[in-house]
């Protein structure tokens, strides 16, 4: 069994619990306060499980922060920053909101799909890159078209820039 599988089956690690405790300490010790810690707690859990949130990890977060599992599932399935299915080693999120679309995001998406040989929502056969489904605004409209790769923003994209960025991903 891989270490990722062990983490998924065993809930949260001691380090993850400490990190979540830091977030919980920022909010009142009430159900509302604990709900405020769901997003950062899910980030911690997702980071520790290979970039996605298996149900067991969401259950572990819910149990640890003292909320019904459904409250955690609602957040994890609402926000596009969370993945509830396995993903590649690198997540590429191309913004397809209005500002980026007006500045050529359709061409950028088409170029990335062709280069990688996959469509939005798919992962390369080698597990290297997941091209995430259409992404809502990533709040960098002045640099449109733009994308987020593993939490790093890339702006003013061109097909050549896409090639350079994707080629660097191991």
Image (cartoon, helix red, strand yellow):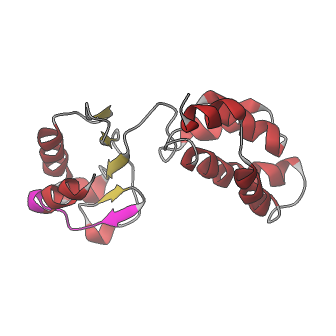
Q: Position of residue 148 (x, y in %)?
A: 35, 57
The segment highlighted magenta reads: 152-160
Which quadrant of the rendered structure holds the N terminus?
Answer: top right
Q: Which residue is situated farthest in the left direction here?
A: 160
Q: Residue at x 55, y 37 (%)?
A: 4
**Above or below: residue 22 compared with residue 41:** below
Q: Position of residue 2 (x, y in %)?
A: 53, 33
Q: Which residue is situated farthest in the bottom direction here?
A: 142
* 24 relative position to 91: left or right: right
Q: Residue at x 27, y 70 (%)?
A: 143
> How many numbered markers are drawn?
0
Q: Residue at x 81, y 50 (%)?
A: 34
Foreground pick, 63 / 76: 63
Q: Is residue 37 visible?
A: no
Picture quadrant of residue 123? top left
Q: Which residue is situated farthest in the right direction here?
A: 29
Foreground pick, 170 / 94: 170
Picture quadrant of residue 147? bottom left
Q: Is residue 119 visible?
A: yes
**Above or below: residue 139 compared with residue 127:** below
Membership of 68 in magenta stretch: no
**Above or below: residue 148 compared with residue 134:** below
Q: Residue at x 63, y 51 (%)?
A: 44
* 141 relative position to 41: left or right: left
Q: Position of residue 141 (x, y in %)?
A: 32, 66
* 103 relative position to 25: left or right: left
């Amino acid at each position: 069994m891989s270490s990722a599988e062990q983490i998924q089956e065993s809930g949260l690690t001691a380090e993850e619990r400490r990190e979540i405790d830091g977030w919980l300490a920022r909010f009142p010790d009430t159900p509302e306060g604990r709900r405020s810690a769901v997003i950062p707690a899910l980030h911690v859990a997702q980071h520790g499980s290979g970039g996605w949130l298996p149900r067991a990890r969401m259950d572990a977060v819910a149990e640890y922060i003292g909320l019904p599992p459904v409250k955690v599932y609602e957040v994890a399935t609402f926000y596009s920053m969370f993945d509830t299915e396995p993903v590649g080693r690198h997540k590429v999120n191309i913004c397809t909101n209005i500002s980026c679309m007006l500045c050529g995001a359709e061409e950028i998406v088409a170029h990335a799909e062709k280069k990688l040989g996959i469509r939005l929502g798919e992962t390369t056969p080698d597990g290297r890159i997941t091209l995430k489904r259409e992404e809502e605004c990533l709040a960098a409209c002045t640099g449109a078209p733009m994308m987020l790769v593993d939490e790093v923003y890339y702006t003013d994209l061109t097909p050549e820039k896409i090639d350079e960025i994707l080629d660097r991903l191991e």
